[in-house]
Image: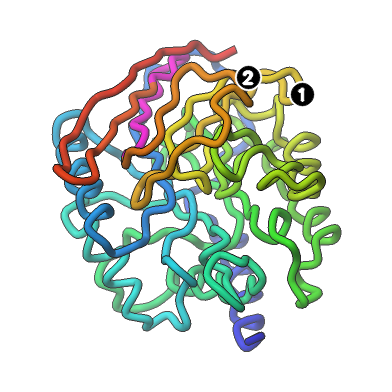
Amino acid sequence: MNKMMLPVLLSSVVAAQALAMSKTPEPLPDVGTVNKTVRFIAIGDMGTGGDGQYKVAAALESVCAERGCDFAIGLGDNIYEAGVDSVSDIQFQTKFEDPYKNLNFPFYMTLGNHDNSWLFGGDGLDNDKGDIQVDYHYQQNRPSNKWQMPARYYTFSAPLNEEQPLINFFSLDSNPLAAVGDADAEYWQLPYKKTQAEWIDRELNNASAPWKIAFAHHPFLSNGKHGNAGMYDGFPGAGVVYYDMLKDHVCNKVDVMIAGHDHELQFLQPVDKCGKTLHMVSGAGGKSREFKDTERNAAYWQQDKTLGFFYIEIAGDEFRATSYTVDSVSGELTRAFDKTLTRQ
């Protein structure tokens, strides 16, 4: 396993923590309804470089031209099938820069299992490989500055670059905790969970925005093939370390948890074990698949065997979600579902 990127990762993480992606404000009281609006795209599992990714990209252009988009959150599996080998890997161009060249806003990215592959695509066994995608954030002379990933886990606020934000976002690193494991001690599950959980606690304690949204590649809940954390792919205990971290440090502390991994669109209802937190799965940005068990978790809405994404608008205390489906053959864009919820 290639461990050459470890020193670069460590310097990148230190730089990210020191500089941050947006100015971290002093803690402020929860101000309730704020006269601000943020609009963003939630899209995952998109980096195929294929026809499906381009069809979804064209749909994004149409929706954002009509409704406005401030940024996107990219939910992992950014570069299929097995990630990249260097910051100059042509796949950054063919599977990110080219498909989204007509979109003029940043993508805040997180890592998926395919981005951390070792023996075969998707095994998630070499987290050093995912570090290259962090390094790309700092690469000079990129075709654009859209790719935003200053560390394996990080936070940013929206509206972007405002002192009093409406939303605090927390990008989590799920793969070291959800995959089988990594031979590198840097990513051993229990110490990595402890370090990341302490960071989550600290950042949540300092978060001043009324809305708090976490996003990662692996879901806490899903009706797709991979299923719920702690029982991934039908195996008891699979992803249990990740489940424990989310349950103890994220659930009921953030308003929404958004993930990918399963290649469908799901807007799931809160469950008792995770308190008020809403759950969304948006893993159809480049691939589609059918559900495994539509009754596993109660849903406001869900759809399989389609490409697509979620468009989310948060205005004051209102969370307005729209699901868009994209036909994999014709590219036809359909506004499939709308739901508005009020912050609890």
Q: Quadrant of residue 89?
A: bottom left
Residue at (36%, 38%) from the top-left corner?
Answer: 305
Residue at (37%, 54%) from the top-left corner?
Answer: 46
Foreground pick, 311 / 268: 268
Q: Amino acid at mark 1?
A: Lys
| Residue at mark 1 to residue at mark 2: CA–CA distance | 9 Å
Q: Amino acid at mark 2?
A: Pro
Q: Main secondary structure of the magenta part?
A: strand
Label annotation for residue 103: none
Please say if 285 is above or below 293: below
Screen quadrant of the N terminus: bottom right
Which residue in the structure is indicated by mark 2?
Answer: 270
Screen quadrant of the C terminus: top right
Where in the figure is residue 299, as x and y percent of width and height?
A: 53, 19
Q: Which residues are magenta?
A: 308-320
Residue 188 shows in this picture:
yes
Q: Quadrant of residue 220?
A: top right
Which residue in the structure is indicated by mark 1?
Answer: 273
Please say if 310 is above or below 172: above
Where in the figure is residue 109, as x and y percent of width and height?
A: 46, 55
